[in-house]
Amino acid sequence: MRTMGLDVGTKTIGVAVSDGLGLTAQAITTVRRTNLKADLAELSELVREHEVSRIVVGLPLNMDGSEGPRAEASRKFAETAGQALGVPVEFWDERLSTVAAERTLLEADLTRAKRRQVIDQVAAQFILQGWLDAHRPAADLHADDFDPEY
């Protein structure tokens, strides 16, 4: 089963999903928001199509770590989405994810128009990758597992 990452905005929702092993996040689409029912229907189809078992929603905290109106709106959307889609929802601090996504897209030399088309899904990819990296089990390595002759 896969994990889905969401970058929830007022006009769009960036979407990314993990690979089957939960190692990497891939940006997949941007949902253009119209109304809650339509937004949830589109996300429901993506959850089904990608066999998603968990959703990670970016939580837009203020730089001092406090929650403002955008964080409150994200929590409310996530609660509704989790109930409607029937999957557990977790949050991940998304501070600077859009900045990192923009920097990556600039380094890739994408035009302004192309960056605008994909920025939200790349931000969702950064959110999900951060969550995946933080939740990856530590390797259970022992000194006697290594062959000194190798």
Image (cartoon, rainbow, N blue to C red):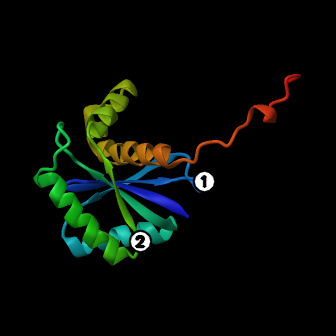
Q: Position of residue 143 (x, y in %)?
A: 75, 31
Quarter of the image holding residue 30? bottom left
**At 24% across and 75% down in the image, what residue appears?**
37
Q: Secondary structure at mark 2?
A: loop
Which quadrant of the rendered structure holds the N terminus? Answer: bottom right
According to the picture, the residue beneath numbered tag 2 turns out to be: 87
Rounded to the nearest whole Å, what is the CA distance between mark 1 and mark 2? 18 Å
Residue 103 visible from this viewpoint: yes
Residue 33 visible from this viewpoint: no
Quarter of the image holding residue 108? top left
- Badge 2 density bin: few <14, some 14–19, many ≥20, Cα 10 Å: some
According to the picture, the residue beneath numbered tag 1 turns out to be: 21
Q: Position of residue 61 (x, y in %)?
A: 20, 45
Q: Position of residue 15 (x, y in %)?
A: 37, 55
Is residue 80 depicted above or below 149 in this figure? below
Q: Position of residue 64 (x, y in %)?
A: 17, 37
Q: Please give left or right for residue 95 compared with residue 136 in the image.
A: left
Is residue 51 depicted above or below 57 in this figure? below
Q: Nearer the viewer, residue 84 or 133?
A: 133
- Badge 1 density bin: few <14, some 14–19, many ≥20, Cα 10 Å: few
First-in-chain label (1 vs 2): 1
**At 47% across and 59% down in the image, what residue appears?**
3
Tag 2: amino acid: Val
Tag 1: amino acid: Leu
Q: Secondary structure at mark 1?
A: loop
Asked whether the residues under the numbered discs 1 and 2 touch, taking CB atoms below 8 Å apart as contact, a structural biologist would say no
**At 22% across and 58% down in the image, what residue appears?**
74
Which quadrant of the rendered structure holds the C terminus? Answer: top right
Q: Please give left or right for residue 42 compared with residue 10 in the image.
A: right
